[in-house]
Amino acid sequence: MTEQLRPDGSLRHLLTLESLSRAQIERLLDRSQTYVRPLGERPPRSTALAGLTVANLFTEPSTRTRVSFELAAKRLGAEVVNLEVQLSSRVKGESMLDTVYTLQALHVDALVIRDAEAGVPGLVAGHVAAHVSVLSAGEAHVAHPTQGLLDALTIYQRKQRFAGLAVAIVGDIRHSRVARSAWHALRALGVTDLRLVAPAALMPAAEEFEGCARVRSIAKGIEGVDVVMMLRIQKERFGDADVPDGDKYFAAWGLTPERLALARPGAIVMHPQPMNRGVEIASLVADGPQSVIRDQVRNGVAVRMAVLAEVLGTRGGA
Ligand code: NCD
C-alpha cells in the first residue's frame, strides 16, 4: 500500500482511513469543525493555500463530492481545475498517468481523484513528484476517506461521543466505499457496536469488516441504535446479484418511520446520497426531524477544507 505519511509523520496523501490512528483522525475532525458555520452565515475563507493549484480528476459521476472539493479549495484561496475524463478501462492506467504528468507540469499541487477501478488513487500517488499530494474522492468499492470523516464528524456533532454508540449500516454494504470508510473511522474512534444490516447478496465477504455484527433483518438490525446509516443500492457495481428492486426492496429493507421507531429515541438518520427515495428510504424519514443528511453535505466542505489544509498547509502562501 502507498505510504500516506511524509517521513516527518505529517499527512501527505489521503487514500484511506484504514491505516490512520485515532489521534490522526481526531486531529482532522477537530480541524474540520473549525470550518463549520451555521447556514446563513458566510463560510470561512482564508488565503492558506494562495498560489497553490488543486485539480479534480473525476472519471465517475459526482455532484456533492466534486462541488465540495472545489468549494473547499477555493475557500482556502487555491486555484482549481476540474477534469471529467472518460477513459476506456484498457488504456486507463497509462492514460491516467499521462494526464497526471500533464497536470503536474501545469503546477498542480494536489490531485483529487475519483475512479471506479480499485487501486487508481494509490497508483497515481506512487508516481507523482514529491511535492504533489493525492486525495481520494472515492475509489471503486474500496474507500471514500473524506466521506468517512464527514460521517464521523456528523455523528460527533449530534452525539458528542463515539464510545458506547450503536451504529447500523443498512443496505448495499458489499459495494459501498462509504461503508468501508465509515467503518475504518468509527472503529478507530472507539465504536464497538457496529452492525451490518443487509440481505445476503449485499453483505460483504465474511473476511471483511472484522468485529461487526451481521444482521439479516432491518427491524432487528436497527433496534436500539443511535445512528442509522442508509446506503444506496449501487446497481452499477454488481452484475446479476439476486436483489429485489424498487417496491419489493422498500418493503423488505426500506427505512420507514415505523422501522425508525425501533431505534433509540433521538437516533439520527444518515445517507451519503444520491438517495433513492421510496427504495432504501422513505421521504418522510429523509426529510424528517431525525435526518442529518443535509448536515452531512455541509460538513463535507469543512472536512475537505481540513484535509486540503492538512496536506498542503506547510506549502501555502499565508
Ligand atoms: C457515494 C459514492 O459515490 O460513493 N456518494 C457520495 O460520494 N456521497 C455513495 C453512492 O454513490 O451511493
Image: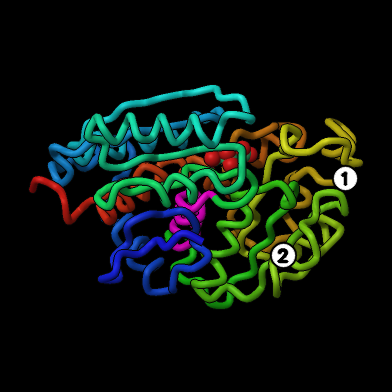
Magenta stretch: give its range: 144-156
In the image, residue 94 lies at what x, y percent?
51, 34
Q: Classify 313 as above or below 284.
A: below
Q: Nearer the viewer, residue 152 or 112?
A: 112
Q: Mark 2 or 1 closer to N-term?
A: 2
Model colouring: rainbow
Magenta-drawn stretch contains 150: yes
Q: Mark 2 = which residue?
A: 208
Q: Nearer the viewer, mark 2 or mark 1?
A: 2
Residue visible at 21% across and 41% down?
76
Query: What secondary structure is marked by label 1?
Result: helix
Q: Which residue is at a point 87% across and 41% down the rendered structure image?
A: 241
Q: CA distance from mark 2 to mark 1?
A: 24 Å
Residue 130: in magenta span: no
Q: Main secondary structure of the magenta part?
A: helix
Name which quarter of the figure residue 298 lies in.
top left
Residue 237 figure quarter:
top right
Where's ligand 1: which quadrant? top right
Q: Can residue 249 be seen at all in this image of the molecule?
A: yes
Which residue: 74% across, 61% down?
A: 196
Residue ID for mark 1? 252
- Neighbor class of circle 2 (other Cα within 10 Å; few <14, some 14-19, many 20+) is few
Q: Is residue 231 left or right of residue 20?
A: right
The crowd level at tag 1 (other Cα within 10 Å; few <14, some 14-19, many 20+) is: some
Residue 36 visible from this viewpoint: no
Residue at the (65%, 55%) spot, across then down: 228
